[in-house]
Structures are given as C-alpha cells and as structure tokens.
Amino acid sequence: MTSVTVTNKEIASKQLGIMLLALIGLLFAGGLAISNLMTAGHAAFNTDNLGLFWGFPIVIYDYFLLTSTGLAMVASMALIFGGEDYRPIIRRALWLALAGLLGGVAVLMMELGHPLRALWAIPFSFAFSSPLYWKVMAVSFYVLSLVILQARMMKPDWQTQDLRINAMVTLALALAVTAIAGVVYGSQSFRPFWASGDIPVAFIFESLLGGLAFIIFFTYLAYAFNPAAVPASVKKLFNDRLTNLLALAIFIHLLFVLARMSSGLYGNAEGLQVWQTLATSRLFFAEIFIGLLLPLVLLVNPRTRIRPWAQILAALLVMNALLIARYEYIIGGQLVPLFKGAWAPPLLNYAPSPTEWLLLLVAIFLSNAVNAFGEMTLRLGREG
Amino acid sequence: MAKWGMVIDLDTCTGCQACTTACAMENNRLPGENWQDVLFYHEGTYPNVKLMWFPRPCMHCENPSCVSVCPTKATYKDPDGGFVLMDYNKCIGCKYCQVACPYGVRFYVDEKAVVQPDIRGVFPSEAGRQWDPPYKGPQDDPSRGIGIQPHGVVSKCTFCYHKVSKAPKGVADLDEDIPELKEYVPACVRVCAPKARFFGDLDQPQSMVNKLIADKRGVRLKDETGNKPQVYYLSGGATASVPSLRSMNDSGQS
C-alpha cells in the first residue's frame, strides 16, 4: 500500500512536469507561430490560390476534432451500455476529448481569416445549406454536452437514468459532428478523391480508432508509463477488451483505405490520378505498414498483445498513422489544380511550412497541458 | 428582373488577354491573381502540338456550389441580376467556397504573392485593406465585393456589378457598340477587340446572348457539376474548344 502511495505521488509530480513542459512548449511554439502570422500573415502558410486552399492547419483541426469525438463515443457508449469494465477510462476519455478539441479549435482559429467574426457570423447566419454551418453548430452543442457530462460525473453515482440520457446526447452529437465532418468533404462531387457517400461512415470508424488509441496511450501516460502503477482493473480492460477493439478498428480502417486506393487506382475520373502518386509514396507506405499493419500484428499476437510496451507502441503508431491518413485525404483531394492552365503543374506541390508545423506543436502542447491539468486536479482514473 | 449572362465565342477569341488586363485595371487585381484569365495550354504531343487558350471568368452560376457551402452567407446570389457576389463584412476566410467552386475562380486575398515583388508591400494600405494602389476604381462597396479587399477574405469576379447594375431596366443586351449603353458593359466585354464576348439578359428570349447560344449551340463549362453557369461558350471545333478537364497537364491532355 505504501509503495502504491509513493508511486501515486511520483506520478502526480510527473503530471506536473508534463504540464509545465507542455506550457513551456506552448509558449515557445505559440509565440513563434503568432509572431510569424503577425509579420507574414496568411502567407506564412504554404497554401495557394491554384487549388490548395486547405493546408496542414485544417488537417490538424480535423484530426484533433475527430479524435475528440472518437473519445467521446467510447466513453458515452460505455456509460449507455453499462460496461462496468470500462469505468476506469470513462472520465479520462471525456476530459481528453475536451483537451483535444481545444487544441484543434485553437489551430483553426489561427487559420481562419476572421476568427472572431466567425463566432457570431456562423451561428446567426442560419446558412442551413452549408455543411460547415451544421458542423459548427454540432460542435458547439457537443462541447456543451461534454462539459455537462464531465461535471455530472464528478458525482459518485454513475448508474442513474439522467447520466445515461446525458451520455446518449453526447454520443449522438459526437456521431453528428463526425458524420458532418465527412459530409464537408464527401459532398464535393467534382473532387472524386473526396466525394463518396461512405465518407461520413469512414470518418466515424476513424474517430473510434483514434479514440481507442488515444485512451490507451494517455492512460499509460497518466501512470507515467509505469505498468506497475497501472490499476489491475485498467490492465484487465486493456488486455480483455480494448486491445481487441483497437485491432478490429485498425482492420476496418485498413479496409476503407485499401478500398479507396483500389477504386482510385482503377478509376479514371479527374482527381483520382493523385492515387498514382500517393500509393507509391513513402508516407503512404509508412502509414500502411508501420502505422497500421505493425500495430495490428502486435495486437493480435497473443504473446505481445498483453504487453504494456506493445499496447503503448501500437497506440502511438496508430495515432501517427491517422494523422498521415488525414493529411493524405485532405491534401490529396486538392492536388489537381482548378483551371489554371499551363501556369500550374499537373499536380500541385505542397509541404507544410515551418509555421504550419508550429501549429501542430501548438495543438499538441495545448492539449497535453489541459490533459495534465485534468489528471492532476480531477482524479480522472476514478471508477465511480 | 434580369439574369445577366455572358457568351464567349472561342472561334473569335485570339487569347490577347485584353479582358484580363481590363479586369485587373477595373478591379485593382494583384498581378497574377486574375478574376478573369485566359488560360493557355497545349493539346497533342510533339510534333503535333497546338497551343490553345481558354478565357475563364467567374461563371456566376444559377445554382452555385460556393453559395450553398458558405457558412455565413457571405457569398450570395443576387436575385436582381443573378450575380454571385461576396460580402466582405461577413466573410470569415474559411475558404470553403474556394474548395467547392469547380472553376477555380475564387481568390483568398492574403496568400503569397504570385508575382514578385509583392506589390502589396510596394503600396501598403493603412486603412486595413490589402493594398493601396495609386489608381483605385471609384466604386467601393464591401457588401458586394467591390473595391480593394480587406484582409482575411475571399474575393471574386463581380460581373462588374458596379457598372451592370446601373444599366437601364429592361435592356436585353449590354453591347459596347451601343453608345448609350457602353458605360454599363463589363470591362472584359467592353475591351474585347475581336468581339468574342457578348453580355445580355438570359431571361429575355430576344437577347443576342440567347440567339447566339441557340444558333451556335452554346455550351457550359463542366455542366455535369449541376452548377449551371451563366457563362456560355461557343466553339465550332476548328480552334479552341471547351476543356473537359480542369488540370491542363504537360502531356497534352486538356
């Protein structure tokens, strides 16, 4: 008992360390990014008017947003369906969903031309025909629902009807946000790289995959990657349930990616030629073999799947693979220039600028600082 | 209420770029960021190569996807005239309209300069606008996307709303050859030396634009998108043709 208490103190001090480190990083990356944006403006990004309008900041925003909804889906489903085994991760997943969303939205605000105007112009426009209008409205209610659910779970009794209803609302909103995010891209019929009716469904599976990977990684991080400090209930949950679910989610995501790739390689609609380049790129190979297949092997192999290092590694690789997938999807859909004649190359060249990379750091540091704060103050591992 | 439309005769167009220049002067466009452009591309492979060109303004679509997707209604379809316009006061710079436009005719104002030196730095603005050129058009209406753009918004061709909207009511065609109407003709149409451009009311059956579309089988660019452009192209097929693809790559495909 004494040793556990000592370990908990050590862990608390490590969380403080993580938070301080994240805050220092946020100050550095955020300061530098803001300085670049103040001096160079939007030209600090490598986007252009030839066809590449949404760059890395939008990739980061959507990545963090969909991870957040994935975490909320995992937590709310556990509450709705009464999975007792899932209790140790519910509050952590909900808090992490808020922290991740905050990081993503912060980056979006730095990308928009008029972020403050967006706060009133979107809600009061009643632009019902726009998927982005519905996305923003859904995100707003989703945040509200997350906060209410998190606040409710500060109380001990987790088996009441009101909590279940709250979780249902959160789940519905998380699904709505994710599906609408898919519609934003999937509805662009003249961009066959994006357009597909199943994109919202693919996004939901990707969200779930991200949610599972993040909860595994950040639960271990909460215990400073010290398996001895991880409670038995968490270990049991990971070994019996989450690793299987993560493996299944990886498999489904792989199917979606490979199906899109096959259709893309055989299709001849304008825009699908991006697949010829993409499918032979190192980034794509890294995503498929290192980011998805390697974790899948680690998680289905009986000898490795219960090892904490394998679970942490698998989660980390999946987190990176999803970022690559989001990048390839969003950027890939814009690589064919739009009626720019011989002035533009057949496929546009794009690589994130230093400022755009800084925005990724901003999102990571901000989310980690908020998450570590929650770990320190809210006892996120509490099981009821 | 009129529904203004443009007809561009590709058999007559010489690709001289006078339209591009006139538009740039009229609307204070930045070098290289042309609301109205003539795109050049190759067709065929060596030794059978042809240099082709294709004039491309905003299509001012009847069913514009850019308007549908705008989350703040900053871009809108003017019911009186059918113009697709921008309200700079509502635009948040999310660029969804750029993403949703199949024709690439929208421009985010704060991107890197296409042509160096960046003329915005040579003539900086102190009034929160993008730049302060020595000559500015006399019109300034941010709610319709007319005048020098502020920062952080998307801009586009207005079909010279500031001229066309003042035309006498009920006019079927705005023809630069009619002295009393020439001031209302869009800049790109007015300067077209080979008279490859025609501008008129698509809702009036007797208008020249409707006759040309009917007689010479006018077609619309990428009609399969469902956007229903109000710009029509005429092509006998002997010279330039309407490209079917948006990317014009160096292997000769258009």
Image (tube, grey):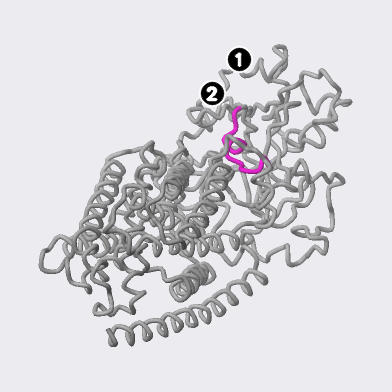
Number of the label disc, if any, that sits on residue B236: 2
Residue for point 54% across, 23% down:
B236
Judged left or right of residue B55, residue A305 is left
How busy is the neighbourhood of tag 1: few (under 14 within 10 Å), some, or many (20 plus)? few
- Quadrant containing the N terminus of chain A is bottom left
Kind of element beneath mark 1: helix
Q: Chain of mark 1?
A: B
Q: Is residue A132 magenta?
A: no
Residue of label 1: B214
Is disc 2 in contact with disc 1, using a CB cutoff of under 8 Å? no
Residue closest to the eye, A250 or B242: A250
Q: Is residue A251 above or below residue B52?
A: below
Name the front one of labels 2 and 1: 1
* Residue A183 seen in the figure: yes
Most extreme residue toward the top, as rendered? B206
Q: Is residue A361 above or below residue A78?
A: below
Q: Is residue B69 magenta?
A: yes
Number of the label disc, if any, that sits on residue B15: none
Residue A308 found in image quarter: bottom left
- Quadrant containing the C terminus of chain A is bottom left
Judged left or right of residue B23, residue A19 is left
Question: Residue B66 placed where, x, y %?
Answer: 59, 38
Judged left or right of residue A305, residue B39 is right
Residue closest to the eye, B14 or B223: B223
**Magenta segment range?**
B63-74
Residue for point 60% across, 14% down:
B215
